[in-house]
Amino acid sequence: MPIYWHAYEAKVLKGRRSQLERAFVRTLFTRVLRELARPRCRLTADRGFADVWRFDLLDELKVAFIIRTKESVKVYAEREWRKLKTLRLRGNTRRRSLGRLRYCESSPRRLYLTQSRARNRKGQWGLWWLVSNRHFSAYQACDEYARRWGCECGFRDAKDLLGLAEARIKNARAYARMFTLVAIALLLLAIIGCVFLQTGQAARARLRRVSSDRGTHSELSLFSAMLHLLKHDVGLWNYLNPKAKLNLEVTLQNVG
């Protein structure tokens, strides 16, 4: 679920993206999620966020992270600086822990790294190098990072299913208002979906009508599956709490 976002004009982002991203992360954890115990926070992110300065910020905030990093990054392994892509898995090994290594030759940080591999949709092997500030096993790190898929599906649906991608809005404040409407729609779908899933076997049987079972994950997010089901079963609206109230006047100043 989207819990905090900030819209920027394109001219504001130019040359300041990394600085604004760090400010966003700091605000997220110090103000928006300040009531949430730090041990319950785990940040996962893709390769675009693998930045040592961002790692320092998350360490300062005492937030555990598991971030995929690029194969071109150098780590100090086997008594020399080597690119991650030169550290190959052997035999049928699917994952392994590389331990706590010096990461990034130009600005070293001691971080934990794990290596995992899996086949993509084309059947080709792909490697994941995951970096973390916590001592997760290779299995734990891979399993936690895999949770990103649900976030990606939700983000995709926010853009595509509910009209955000089609919006041609240039003003940042107007775009923020549009995203607020999308977030409310996602919240309503999540409320219906979460209660619906608690009904057990009947819910799973109905979900199979719109979503194939991949074993470890579904190709549809909860939002997408519920949208498909709602088109054919209006009775699902009965799972929505009609007494829920949304405060559209809330601002960052009075969060918490």
Image (spheres, rainbow, N blue to C red):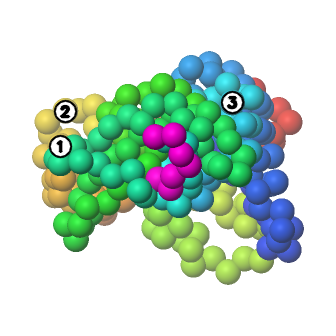
Instruction: Note whether residue 46 is visible.
Output: no
Estimate how packed mark 3 is, as few (under 14), some (14 to 19) or many (20 or more) residues with alpha carbons within 10 Å: some
Label 1 with label 3: CB-CB less than 8 Å: no
Estimate how packed mark 1 is, as few (under 14), some (14 to 19) or many (20 or more) residues with alpha carbons within 10 Å: some
The answer to which quarter of the image holds residue 26 is: top right
In this rendering, the label closer to the viewer, 1 or 3: 3
Instruction: Note whether residue 107 is visible.
Output: yes
Residue 58, compared with residue 48, is above or below; it is above
What amino acid is found at the position of numbered circle 2 in the picture? Gly
The answer to which quarter of the image holds residue 126 is: bottom left
**How far apart in space, not on screen, are marks 2 and 1 (Cα)?**
7 Å
Q: Which residue is mark 3?
A: 59
Q: Earlier in the sequence, mark 1 or mark 3?
A: 3
What amino acid is found at the position of numbered circle 1 in the picture? Arg
SS category of the residue bearing label 2 = loop
- Magenta extent: 78-84
Residue at (28, 31) in percent of width and height:
198
Residue at (72, 37) in percent of width and height:
56
Q: Which residue is mark 1?
A: 204
Q: Is residue 204 left or right of residue 102?
A: left
x and y, in percent, of residue 156 in the image: 47, 63
Q: Is residue 122 left or right of residue 168?
A: left
Estimate how packed mark 2 is, as few (under 14), some (14 to 19) or many (20 or more) residues with alpha carbons within 10 Å: few
Q: Earlier in the sequence, mark 3 or mark 2?
A: 3
